[in-house]
Image (spheres, rainbow, N blue to C red):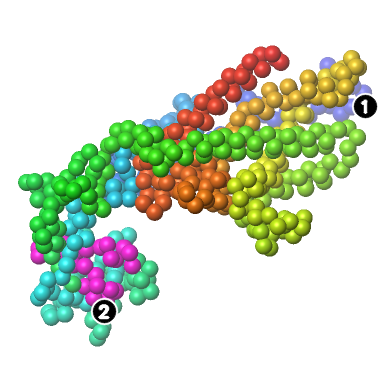
Amino acid sequence: MTAVEGESPPRPGPRAGKHGPAPARREISTAFVVSRIAVLGVVAAILLYAVPPLIATEAWTALAVLGVATVVIGYLYLTRRFVPAKYLVPGTIFLIAFQVFPVVYTLTTAFTNFGDGHRGDKQAAIEAIESGSVRQTPGSPEYGLTIGRKGDELVFLLVDTKTKQVQAGTADGLTPLPGAKVSLGGKVTQAPGYIVLTTPQAAELGSEISAFSVPTPGGAIKANGLSRAVEGKAQMTYEAGCDCVVDAGNGRRWTADESRGFFVDSSGRHLAQGWQVNVGLANFTRVVTDPAISGYFLGVFTWNVFFAVASVLTTFALGMGVALTLHHPRMRGTKIYRVVLVLPYAMPAFAMLLVWRDMFNRDFGLINQLFGLNLDWLGEPTTARLAIILVNLWLGFPYMFLVTTGALQAIPRELTEAAGIDGASPTYAFRKVTLPLLLVALTPLLISSFAFNFNNFNAIALTTEGGPFPAESPQVGATDLLITYTFRVAFGAGGAQFGFAAAISVFIFTIVAVISAVTFRRTRRQEEVYS
């Protein structure tokens, strides 16, 4: 075939190899090598970071799992085989790490009493009780104290006031410290192998220093301020024969209650320090049987559902209305309008929530000043709830505007034009043609928006903090959602109760999952009608 007159002959393409164009193949090979190096580098970094602490804590099972995973990933990315697995493995690892593991951990925690006072095992509880009861005895040694560190471990650098001997005190005991330098005031200024902290640095560790003790044959060494330490004797000791803690001063006994993870006396009172145990369904039954929780559960749940539904409906209605307006063929300047309308969505939500809280202030808030009102927006239940919904509307409608705009682009204009030719009014065409097609496309997003607003902790915590609170029930407020109510109950004045909080989280997850499943089933029927 000859070239057409007036046209230049076609240029020869790139030199082709056996399996395709050579440059393209070279680019793919380079990208693959770079990605392989990146994955192996990340795996090596995780291995170097995780192995030392796992060995130090003797977590052999976790170490074995890490070793096997490293070998498998290394083999997978060093061989040319198993190409699909090379893309699936990273996603699977992230799925397990950030989705499966948190869910499983939360579920298992719900069956324990894990929380403040129950963070360790029984032996750790005994050591904490004994070290916390250390009292100085007459004639016991005294030391000049300097606070130091060895890695992340707190260390007492001790100077005996009589012998001037310098020792390092750790959780394992005392160790002689030759070569240490001591000032005239009795403070250690230099200790080989240790970092000597200044007084301001030590002051920041006040609670950690107060709880720390160095075990000795005669008792334990405790800090008395930041420059002095004394050796004392534990007033409360554990006796294995009776499985109890005995107070040496008055002979009082606390017997171990393995079902609750406490040492309990004859009157039923327990020591503050306990240990972690499996409590079965106790956390779940507490949600139903504890009057402080179950008495307000229905009211909080009703408002929670109303808040989530109202947030979704109002944001969707406003976002869809604006999207339909800008989608009209005669509308001009749509790009400018869209940029302006997306601004609330682009701003940090937590900062905007704080701004809106101040705008609703009764005395100097912009809302009252602008409209000449004197409403205590956040001080009355009705107005506080209305304010929360308005704030959420302002924050959420840009998202609905964006997704509705995208969905409208996928609906052919011929459908609405055909409806108009058949004599349908614009309103009727919207109800029977546009809206059903929008709902088919957007219902999954509406369900996810409902789930998000059902657990919208920030909107409540940063605006009303759950209030206003009635005098008869100060632990639950008019705008509390289940998630904020749970946070207050589980992490309030009684200390952190992670096991109980995990149990309520399971309840919340179940509620949202059931509502979402029912909604998805109805959506599937709607898709069948309009498919």
Q: Which mark is residue 6?
A: 1
Q: Which mark is residue 412?
A: none
**Which residue has dot 2 on it?**
187
- The amino acid on which the numbered mark 2 sits, given as a three-letter code, is Lys
Spot the residue most to the left: 241
Spot the residue most to the right: 6
Bounds of the magenta segment = 206-229
Residue 65 vs 488, above or below: the answer is above
- Name which quarter of the figure residue 293 lies in: top left
Between 100 and 401, the one lying in front of the other is 401
- Give the quadrant of the N terminus: top right
Spot the residue most to the bottom: 184
- Would residue 263 appear left or right of 47 to someone viewing this image? left
The spot of residue 183 in percent (x, y) is 26, 83
- The amino acid on which the numbered mark 1 sits, given as a three-letter code, is Gly
The spot of residue 380 in percent (x, y) is 61, 50
Please tell me which residue is depicted at 31% across the width and 72% down the height of the picture: 196
- Judged from the image, the secondary structure of the residue bearing numbered disc 1 is loop
**Number of other residues with Cα within 10 Å of mark 2, as a class: few under 14, some 14 to 19, many 20 or more:** some
- Name which quarter of the figure residue 10 lies in: top right
Q: Is residue 212 magenta?
A: yes
